[in-house]
Image (cartoon, helix red, strand yellow):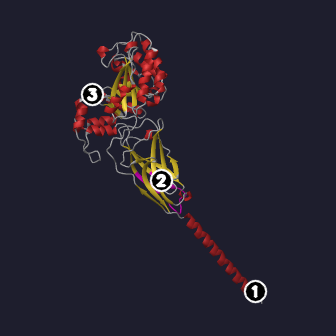
Amino acid sequence: MKHNRKKHKGLRFLLFLILFLTAVSIAGFAYLEHRHLSAELTPSIGALSNEPLRNPYCGFYHIYDYTIADDAVFDPNSLTPFLQEDNLSRLCLLRIDLQRYREGAISDYGLAQVSAILSAWAGTDKDLLLRFTYGPDAFSDMEEPAELTTVYLHMEQLAPIIHEYASRIAAFQGDFIGSHGHGMNSALAEDNDVSELLQYLRSLLDPSVEIAACGAEQYHRVLNDTNEEYMKTFSIYYDDIGTALPPDAVKRFQITGRDHILGGTVGADAALADPSSGAALTLLRQLRLSYLQTSEDSEILQAWKNATYRDDSVFSGVTLYDYVAAHLGYRYVLTSLSMEFNTWQDEDAALQIGIRNDGFANATRPFDTTLFLRNDETEELITFPLDTDNRDWEPDEEILLTARADLRHYDKGSYTLYLMMIDAATGEVIRLGNDTPLGSNGYEIGTLELR
């Protein structure tokens, strides 16, 4: 009997062990089945495009001149033919002549005209370059105030108006005096006076408003009495990019070039007109230029329009002018989309997006960059703000943006991935240099299947 009891106990224990192991196995298989997730990513970033993007704060620009006076009338409808003729560029330079007020304060009527001019242009899709002068853009016709105190007064009167339209002003150029609105050739002021004018203007305007000195000479020589950190608060525009920078100034200036929008005009340097030399593109890249004046009178620009750009990219065969137009400033292109995810080990998937800046320059304003996952069945959008500062994206440099997604908590099914970049100041969508269509959720860059 004792033997049988021991035998039954052993059988019960064996049966319990079998049941226990079976339960553990079932639970283990259930857990593994729960852990297992099939995630398949299919990129669709699109081929590179050679189309102009018309993004804000960069490109070719036209000049529009205005004279304010108590007997002048500004008609907002006068912009209509300008906009019809110039429907490709995003920038324009407004030169506003203050000569009629050289003997004293600008009248309330004159200030209202300035405000009306800026308001009308701010209502278009143009970003503004702004400059004030005393007289037309020719030194022989210029009549400056007799005293610098009048210039300081005009700066004080105009500062609130400039501030009102700060978000639309890409750069404020010059210091009011001298031919073309910069003081290097003014009989009214010495270098130190020009330095003080620029510094006073800087103190009046919000830091978000770019103030551009005229050329490296003014930037370095006139501002030389200030410290380097203060100099970085100023930008540069060039009346002739062919004589832009002496060799010893390039390295020092590029520190500022990372933070400020730079541009100007093309002069008469024959070397820049020869497309075979590559001098023009080398200079534009070296200076990190974001904007250039377009002019029918420029022999160099006409030479660019007649020259064909050749390389192994999608731009081969376009005119040199069109190539420059497409690369002034920043130009972002999608280069890759990938995912790192191990169904047995990883808790989150790492989605990586490759972007390269093909432009001549960094962007100088922040853009909000966001990845969206859209559930194709429910149309629910899952949002991933990407932790990056586009102002640090160097020309010709590829960067990787990473978003971590807890895929195990998502419904199984099909998802579409979108990338959206938005100008933080205006809400405008930044266009990318790929041939992928832009939709309401941004650029479609791939699909994700969860099973």
**Marks 1, 2: nearer the viewer:** 2
Look at the numbered disc 1 and give the secondary structure of its residue. helix
Q: Position of residue 92 (x, y in %)?
A: 36, 29
Q: Position of residue 179 (x, y in %)?
A: 33, 18
Total labels drawn: 3
* 78 in relation to 154, above or below: below
Q: Upstream in the sequence, badge 1 or badge 2? A: 1
Residue 373 picture location, percent across and down: 49, 52
**The magenta stretch spans which residues?**
336-352
For residue 443, above or below residue 411 = above
Determine which quarter of the picture holds residue 330. Answer: top left
Q: Which residue is mark 2?
A: 351
Type of the residue with mark 1: Arg
* Mark 2: few/some/many CA within 10 Å (<14, 14-19, 20+): some
Amino acid type, mark 3: Gly
* Relative height, residue 333 to residue 136 (above, below): below
The residue positioned farthest toward the right in the image shown = 1
Q: Which residue is mark 3?
A: 267
Question: Which disc is residue 5 wearing?
Answer: 1
Position of residue 346 measured from the top left corner of the image (x, y, whole percent): 53, 59
The mark found on residue 375 in the picture is: none
Q: Residue at x 69, y 83 (%)?
A: 11
Closer to the observer: label 3 or label 1? 3
What's the CA distance linking mark 3 and mark 1?
110 Å
- Residues at marks 3 and 2, CA–CA distance in whole angstroms: 47 Å
